Image (tube, rainbow, N blue to C red):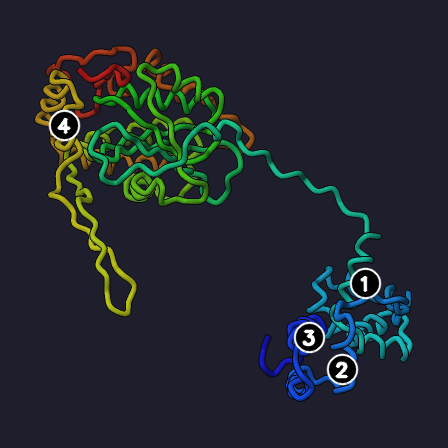
Amino acid sequence: MSIEDKMTIDERRKYLRKMQVRYLQAERKERGQLLDEMEAVSELHRKSLIRLMRGNLTRQPRRKQRGRIYGSDVDDVLRVIAETTDYICSERLTPNLPWLASHLESHGELTISPRLLEQLDQISVSTVERILSRIRQDEPRLPRPRPRPSNSLLRDVPMKRIPWQEKEPGHFEVDLVHHCGRTSSGEYIHTLQMIDVATAWSERRAILGRSYLVVSDAFNRILSHLPFQVREIHPDNGSEFFNNHMLRFWQGLKPKPELSRSRPHHKNDNRFVEQKNSTLVRAYLGYDRLDTVAQTLAVNKLYEKMWLYYNFFQPVMRLAEKTSMPATGQPSRVKRRHDEASTPFDRLCATQAIPQEWREELVALRASTNPRQLRREIYDLIDHIATLPGATPGVTEPVRQTLATHLTSERTSENELASVETRKPKPLGKERTTLVTLSFEGTIPVR
């Protein structure tokens, strides 16, 4: 309560109840001093204070309710004005009632008498709120959609963040990048990206739509591409990742990877993959709409070359230490120290997560690859994707033609797609090109 404000009735009675105890125990002279004090604080008359000190200070209910000051004509005017102003709050409506009533009268919407106009000028905000709350009960309410039920499958999946200091390869952050352009209507391409927290190993796959058919196909393709075991999958809360089909998919793997998810509306829980969405997806494909089978196949060819280029020839720096630096009079800042830059493949080789025969094959693959030529091929593919036309309105794209299994059976050359059938490392041959044709069994335990 502000010093300048007067006491409310409840505040005054609370004060007097505390003073009554002292008043009844005091002598005559002390009672006079207490009355002087209460008169100055409560601003009540001395005789009223003496009467209150001798009686019960509990507030009694009103024996007879006051009659209505504002009649039904005020209700009718408020109903019209509230509807006109789209039912704004009483605090915004009350000061503007007189001129709004006059304005509506000039347009033939209301008939206002001088007495009614005077009442609209005197009415309080609380009275307007009470009248409007009563009026709203008479208005028929449109049916409102019920809140969407939460995904019950998420209840058993723990929310967490993969620690930045994770040393064991195989803990992947997963995200889906939309290539919808200005509108999200219809089917369009998404990029499914997986980033290993420990080594920065990256995997990408373009899919047309978000159905279980294409999402599971992309995961199968990525798992066959990985030379080490997947220990944890950490996506956001999207239904494309958490549905009955995908849960059966992950439970069918042996060994089964751990499933975790980020907190809703916390993008920093997937900070590693979110950063790579910008540098490894948006930086190459931009924000244009991609929505055809031809574009999907071309983007996957681009991702095949990027897989080799970024995992084997692009050194990355990983956070090694974070130290809080307190400052006098200022918020503390965090000092970050990064380790020496190294490629994801070199970081992977420094662990025991990759079998020796696969390591030797990948070492030979890097030795036989010209990174400068590979970079030129990447940018040529980007230019080629930009020339491909978008989908024809009203024409459904054959999504099955983008699946890896379909391409494996229909391809005309080895360069179209790597085999997803062979589950053992293929020996290197002179016929190998810069396009990756490796295929690993990503679900077998590390030996």
User: Callout 1, which amino acid?
Assistant: Ile
In contact (CB < 8 Å): disc 3 and disc 4: no
Which residue is depicted at the point 28% across and 67% down? 330
Q: What secondary structure is marked by label 3?
A: helix
- C-alpha span from label 2 to label 4: 89 Å
Graded by Cα atoms within 10 Å as few (under 14), some (14 to 19) or many (20 or more), the crowding at tag 2 reads some
Q: Which residue is mark 4?
A: 351
Q: State which quadrant residue 367 falls in.
A: top left
Task: Tell which of 48 and 442 is nearer to you.
Answer: 48
Q: Which one is closest to the eye, mark 1 or mark 3? A: 3
Graded by Cα atoms within 10 Å as few (under 14), some (14 to 19) or many (20 or more), the crowding at tag 1 reads some
- C-alpha span from label 2 to label 3: 10 Å
Query: Residue 136 in the image: x percent, y percent?
Result: 79, 55
Query: Residue 231 in the image: x percent, y percent?
Result: 29, 25
Which residue is depicted at the point 21% across and 49% down? 322
Q: Is residue 13 visible?
A: yes
